[in-house]
Image (cartoon, grey):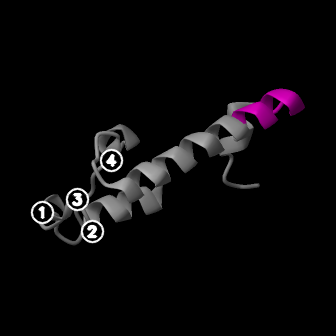
Amino acid sequence: MERIINMGMTGEFAEINEIFREGDTFKFDLEMFRDSKDQNMQLLLGLFDELETVMNTLANINGITEEELEDEDI
């Protein structure tokens, strides 16, 4: 997700990026980038979606919960 945000903020959304100052915080959502016309952005979003699908499939097959997948201590 970080790469998608970085690509968007250096490309199609560069003018928005200029508004942010050091120390500012903002919660990004991938949906903000879905309408992008940038082919690279669309490729990254497709890859992200495919990874999510594979991770959900593996979790279902192996009985792993969403909480276990998001546990940062592992």
Q: Residue at x 66, y 35 (%)?
A: 53
In the rendered structure, the answer to whether residue 1 lies left or right of residue 14 reads right
Label 3 sits on a secondary structure element that is loop
Range of the magenta residues?
Answer: 56-64
State the separation of the CA atoms marked 2 and 1. Answer: 9 Å
Packing grade of label 2 (10 A; few <14, some 14-19, many >=20) is few
Res 61 visible: yes
Q: What residue type is disc 3 on?
A: Glu
| Mark found first going from the N terminus, 4 or 2 | 2
Q: Quadrant of residue 40?
A: bottom left
Q: Are marks 1 and 3 in contact (CB under 8 Å)?
A: no
Residue ID for mark 1 = 15
| Mark found first going from the N terminus, 4 or 1 | 1
Residue ID for mark 3 = 12
Q: Quadrant of residue 9?
A: bottom left
Q: What residue type is disc 1 on?
A: Glu
Q: Position of residue 14 (x, y in %)?
A: 19, 64
Relative depth, front residue between 67 and 31: 31
Q: Residue at x 30, y 41 (%)?
A: 32
- Residue 37 is tagged as none
Q: What residue type is disc 4 on?
A: Lys
Residue ID for mark 4 = 27
State the separation of the CA atoms marked 4 and 1. Answer: 17 Å
Residue ID for mark 2 = 10
Q: Is residue 5 magenta?
A: no
Q: What residue type is disc 2 on?
A: Thr
Q: Position of residue 73 (x, y in %)?
A: 71, 55
